[in-house]
Amino acid sequence: MKPRARWWSAREPSRITRLLGLAVFAAVLFSVPAVFTRIEPYTMSDGVQMAILAIAALGLVPLTGYANQISLGQAAFYGTGAYTSAILTAHSGWNPWLALLIGAVVAGGGAYVLGLFIFRVSGHYLALATIALGLVLAIVARQLTITGGSEGLPGIPYLTVFGTELTGDVAYYYFAAAVLLVATMVVGLVVRSSLGRSLTAVGDSAFAAAASGIDIARYKRVAFVLAAVLAALAGSLYAHWVTYVDVHTLDLLLSIQMLIVVAVGGMRSVWGPAVGAFVVVSLVRFSKEWLPALSEKAGGQVEIVAYGVALILVLLFLPRGVVGEIADLFTRLGASSPPLPASASPAASAGGGDAASAGSAARPAPVGKERS
Amino acid sequence: MGQLLQFVVTGLATGATYALVGLGIALVFQVTGVINFAQGHFVMLGALTFAILEENGTAPVPAALMALAGTTVIGLLVERLVIAPARGAHVDRLIILTIGAAIVIEGAALVAFGTQPRIAAPFTEGVVRFGGVRLERQYLWVSVATILAVAAVWVFLTRTTLGKAMRGVAMDREAARLMGISPRRMSLLVFTLAAALGAIGGVALAPIQHPDPGIGIALGLKGFTAAVIGGLDSPAGAVAGGLLLGVAEAIAAGYLPSGYKDAVAYGVLVLLLLVRPTGVLKTVRAVRV
């Protein structure tokens, strides 16, 4: 997260830019099934996975991208959501939507309580505490009978939306993509709000932020709770998709995967998780396709090499992620050519319209319009 | 009482490995500010290569030396290829990079060696008994290896110019730089040293743990717990923390259902981080932001 000298001027894309970006994003999400059902080796289940993974990783944009807090416990909250949905619907026969809500509340509440303590001191304790939390939950889930032990919990009902039962991958994809779109808009609002600015300040310099009267612990906690809620939501969606939950939903590798998703896509962009999820799921798909022999020997886990290599290469060579670097490219192009009006700038339609981007370096942001 | 004593003795012996892992983590953190998520994987590599070399008929001593050399080279490569190129980056990015390095090491070990656990022969067979307590001889070897390694690190840090330079960087990076000490060279040195420490622990542990590529994460986390008990930036504290953790785990494992044994260490870690993240074994310093 190197400081960018022009961040204050390159920061705010106009409302039109943002709406255009959102429209492009919606169009891309909408057309995924048309592509994935035709092009090998993708399947529609990859599409659902991408959407769920992107939702789960989305909360890391404010938390890790803005506030510089590394969480390796996203899977703990994802698993909390998945298990809550599973237990309440398959076991107790509750309404799935209510169960989903309760899962999000439980995860958010857990994150809040953890956050009360963990953000009192800074440092990198969050990463350690969240890993340990995930591992404790996985051990407990493997032991208890209510969670089905190491067998897991089967028999979770499908979701019903407007009277239609979502059984097929294509239908479920559209549902998950709609959730992703809404979640992206919500996180976009959060990072543009005063909360987002405070988080940026906390991430850039905690000392300066504290000196300016920002309650840094509180802001970190809010971002942490948001990340937990989104992860739990994704976990519930996963549970109703595969209709079966086991301890793999709490796996540390899943938390690492989510961190890779935001690192690859771009930690400071709300579009980052979607792009990152596409790259990560593609990596898994292709490594399974091309390296089956290796995969068998490694117990089907060969893709973790690909994960690791991708993570290292991206952090070394594209430290701002795919979206961040593309936006940067447009910024530089924009800076060398005559200034363009916001809506005509190329970055506007290229999906770069996030907080830290978009062809606007040559054009000072009108301060008065910042919160449009 | 005899049973409790047995738990304490076994715990101290197991804790010796955690102490070594914790020592490596604390050293790297002190010198570079980075929490090295690959530390447990260095132990795994040392243990795995030692066990595999032995399975293939290499004599124990050359096998141990080769495992040590191999792992040390990997530590050096991790620093050169992953950490050094990102110099100037925020520490958070470096931490995520060590996670990347850790999963590459684990994945490469999976691809190269497969998932099955490897079995190494104990250095010397048999069991020692004293005062109603029985202990496999291999645990004594683990303790001896830890004591020697810790003593060597202590001598290095306090009696050699290079070690003093390293402590200088840990105390004040800028001042050390002004004295002509290169933090980059110290970073390379400390990662290499940490890998060597990990390998020593791994070789001694191999006959007890039956290593497979997946043991790295658990060992690393127990090392973190050890280091955090000691306050994360104190080598001596990390060693003491490792021993404490080993004892706590052995006692808990004796009285809890067996499936929960690992949960103890992680539960201790969560609680510590929540309640007293500055370490149990030292007095609190100024509040950091």
Image (spheres, helix red, strand yellow):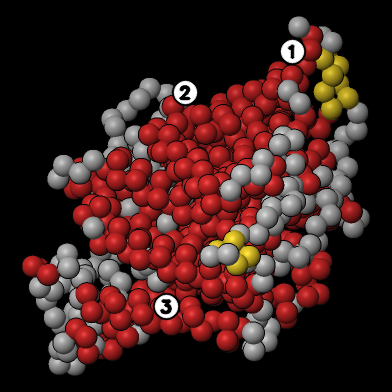
Query: Given the image, on which type of amino acid does mark 1 rest?
Result: Leu
Chain letter of disc 1 in the image: B
Q: Position of residue A331 (x, y in %)?
A: 25, 82
Q: Relative to residue B145, is residue B31 drawn left or right?
A: left
The residue carrying pointer 1 sits among few (fewer than 14), some (14 to 19) or many (20 or more) residues within 10 Å by Cα, namely: few
Label 1 vs 2, first from the N-terminus: 1
In the structure shown, which secondary structural element does the residue marked by tag 2 occupy?
loop
**Residue depicted at x 56% and y 40%:** A132
Chain letter of disc 2 in the image: B
In the structure shown, which secondary structural element does the residue marked by tag 1 occupy?
helix
- Residue B281 numbered mark, or none: 2
- Residue B257 numbered mark, or none: none
Disc 2 and disc 3: Cα gap in Å?
Answer: 54 Å
Query: Given the image, on which type of amino acid does mark 2 rest?
Result: Leu
Q: Nearer the viewer, mark 3 or mark 1?
A: 3
Q: Is residue A371 visible?
A: yes
Question: Hey, which quadrant is residue B85 in on the image?
Answer: bottom left
- Residue B4 numbered mark, or none: 1
Q: Are marks 2 and 3 in contact (CB under 8 Å)?
A: no
Disc 1 and disc 2: Cα gap in Å?
Answer: 23 Å
**Residue tagged by mark 3?**
A26
